[in-house]
Amino acid sequence: MSSDTTAPGSVSQAQAEVDRIRAELAATVDALVAKTDVAARAKESAAHLTAHGRHRIEVAGEQVHETYEAAREKLSSGGVSDRVTPQTLAIGIAPAVLVVAAVLVGRRR
C-alpha cells in the first residue's frame, strides 16, 4: 500500500537536486554557445596575436638598441675602424629588417 504523503525533507532534497542539475545544464549551454560564437573567438585570437606581435617588436627593438650601443662603444674605444663600409652597415641592419619583415608577413596571415 502506498502513501500519498511525502516527507518534507525529501521534497526539499529533490528540489535542491533539480536546482543543481539546472545550474549544470545552464553552464553547459553557456560553454557550447561560447564555442559557437565565431566572431568573439576571432576577436580574441586577433587580440592575442596583436599583443604577441607587439611584444616581438619590442624585443627586436631592444636587441637593435643593444647592438647599436655595443657597436658605438667599440667605435669610441678604437676597437673597430671608424670607417663604416656598406657591408658592415648591411650586417648591422639586416637583423632588424628581418624582424620587421617577419612581423609584417605575420600580420597579413
Image: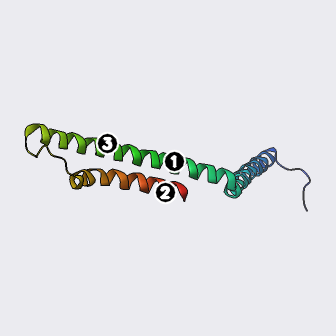
Give percent across and percent down for residue 55.
42, 45
The reply to whether residue 12 is in sight is: yes
Image quadrant where one finds the N terminus: bottom right
Give the mark nearer the N terminus: 3 vs 2. 3
Task: Answer whether labels 1 and 2 touch (C-beta < 8 Å).
Answer: no
Of marks 1 and 2, which one's residue comes earlier in the chain? 1
Occupied quadrant, residue 79: top left
Between residue 60 and residue 84, name the one nearer to us.
84
Residue 36 spot, x, y in % from top left:
70, 58
Amino acid type at circle 2 is: Gly
Residue 99 drawn at (x, y percent): 38, 53
Residue positioned 48% across, 58% down in the render: 105
Density class for disc 1 (Cα within 10 Å; few <14, some 14-19, many ≥20) is some
Q: Is residue 32 left or right of residue 88?
A: right
Q: Which residue is mark 3?
A: 62
Q: Which quadrant holds the C terminus?
A: bottom right
State the image coordinates of residue 51 (x, y, percent, origin top left).
49, 45
* C-alpha separation, residue under disc 3 versus residue under disc 1: 18 Å
Closer to viewer: mark 1 or mark 2: 2
Residue under numbered circle 2: 106
Q: Tag 2: Cα neighbours inside 10 Å, few (<14), some, or many (≥20)?
A: few
Q: Secondary structure at mark 2?
A: helix
Task: Point out which mark residue 50 bears.
Answer: 1
How are the colours assigned in the image? rainbow
Indicate the amino acid at tag 3. Answer: Glu
